[in-house]
């Protein structure tokens, strides 16, 4: 074998050897970064309780604001005054926009505050508010990377919404709860924005180590089907929709206005839901793995909705 023929064989085999020896970037990024979402949630919980009118609420607002302002994302602060059982309460929703090539918007939402009636028990809402805030922030990092340099997402625009005032100020009722979502749905109804929303996807209490997401019965059927399809892609079927459950949550203001909506919620937190709205709702009950699961499903849902 002469030198040149030997060199040609080496040259032909070299790319294969390199491919086998170098880890695939795509493989490394195949799953959502639940660890990053968990870390954001941990930092958010470190603020302490975040009940409206309290000092921790101001710090929570600053945490969200600073994160997205540092990234130079399109951040809107939607301020309003809620009429509550304790009188007028100033509240603030945050909306972060990532532009897409298709006309229309996919909204991913969560609430970020903690329960006002539990303000004296050091209720930090690790799973109830913080985990989903961390989830949306980590999703925002992915969307930011995809839209740097003036680029647009291949499909619909994606907006992240952080609702204030989901929790009751006195006792849960349709009028004393979901202040931020009811305000924003009405506002977007007046200005015509609701007609642009292709899907509204709400995340609530999905950081639970023992993840068990119920099929919320008011949610739009085709979105439930897409969520199940996304879960199946990753082999996550056992974490989703083993039981049906009606839940009053931030999605209802959009459901009632005809917006395709789904509440992705695990309202089975601790034995018999025993951690919910207690001082036991702390970061040791939250799992980066659960946040990876939901992050994977949400990103796949976006892809599937873009294809409709």
Image (cartoon, rainbow, N blue to C red):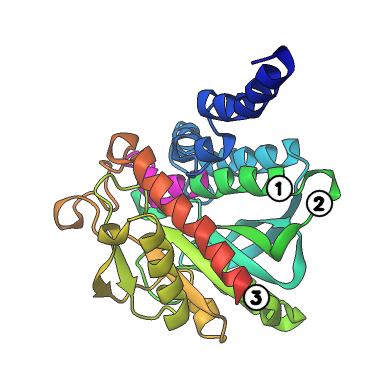
* Overall secondary structure of the magenta section: helix
Q: Tell me where residue 185 appears, x and y as whole percent.
A: 61, 75
Q: Which residue does the numbered mark 3 point to in the structure image?
A: 197
Kind of element beneath mark 3: strand
Q: Residue drawn at (41%, 46%), measured in percent from left and top?
A: 291
Q: Tell me where residue 35 appears, x and y as whole percent.
A: 45, 35
- Identify the mark nearer the N-term, 2 or 1: 1
Q: Which residue does the numbered mark 1 point to in the structure image?
A: 146
Tell which residue pokes out farthest to the front in this image: 1
Q: Residue drawn at (66%, 49%), measured in percent from left and top?
A: 143
- Identify the mark nearer the N-term, 1 or 3: 1
**In front: 7, or 126?**
7
Q: Which residue does the numbered mark 2 point to in the structure image?
A: 151
**In front: 4, or 268?**
4
**Badge 1: few (under 14), some or many (20 or more) residues near its Cα, within 10 Å?**
some
Kind of element beneath mark 2: loop
Q: How far, Cα to Cα, is label 3 from label 2?
A: 21 Å
Question: Can you say which quadrant of the picture contains the N terminus?
Answer: top right
Q: Look at the image and give the residue range highlighted in magenta.
A: 120-134
Drawn side of residue 64 relative to residue 44, left or right = right
Q: How far, Cα to Cα, is label 1 from label 3?
A: 21 Å
Quadrant in the rendering for residue 95:
bottom right
């Amino acid at each position: 074998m002469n030198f040149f023929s030997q060199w040609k064989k080496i040259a032909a085999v070299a790319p294969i050897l390199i491919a086998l020896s170098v880890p695939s970037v795509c493989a490394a990024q195949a799953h959502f970064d639940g660890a990053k979402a968990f870390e954001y949630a941990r930092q958010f919980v470190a603020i302490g309780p975040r009940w409206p009118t309290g000092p921790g609420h101001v710090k929570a607002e600053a945490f969200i604001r600073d994160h997205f302002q540092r990234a130079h994302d399109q951040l809107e602060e939607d301020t309003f005054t809620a009429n509550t059982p304790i009188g007028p309460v100033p509240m603030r929703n945050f909306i972060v926009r990532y532009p897409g090539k298709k006309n229309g918007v996919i909204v991913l939402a969560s609430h970020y505050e903690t329960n006002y009636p539990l303000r004296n028990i050091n209720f930090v809402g690790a799973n109830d508010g913080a985990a989903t805030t961390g989830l949306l922030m980590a999703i925002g990092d992915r969307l930011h990377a995809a839209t740097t340099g003036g680029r647009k997402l291949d499909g619909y625009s994606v907006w992240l919404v952080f609702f204030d005032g989901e929790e009751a100020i006195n006792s849960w009722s349709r009028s004393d709860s979901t202040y931020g979502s009811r305000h924003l749905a009405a506002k977007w109804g007046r200005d015509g924005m609701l007609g642009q929303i292709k899907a509204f996807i709400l995340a609530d209490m999905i950081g639970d180590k023992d993840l068990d997401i119920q099929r919320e019965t008011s949610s739009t059927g085709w979105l439930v089907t897409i969520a199940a399809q996304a879960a199946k892609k990753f082999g996550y079927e056992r974490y989703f929709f083993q039981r049906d459950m009606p839940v009053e949550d931030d999605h209802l203001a959009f459901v009632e206005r005809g917006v395709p909506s789904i509440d992705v919620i695990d309202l089975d937190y601790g034995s018999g839901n025993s951690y919910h709205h207690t001082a036991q709702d702390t970061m040791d009950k939250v799992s980066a793995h659960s946040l990876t699961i939901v992050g994977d499903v949400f990103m796949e849902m976006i892809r599937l909705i873009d294809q409709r």
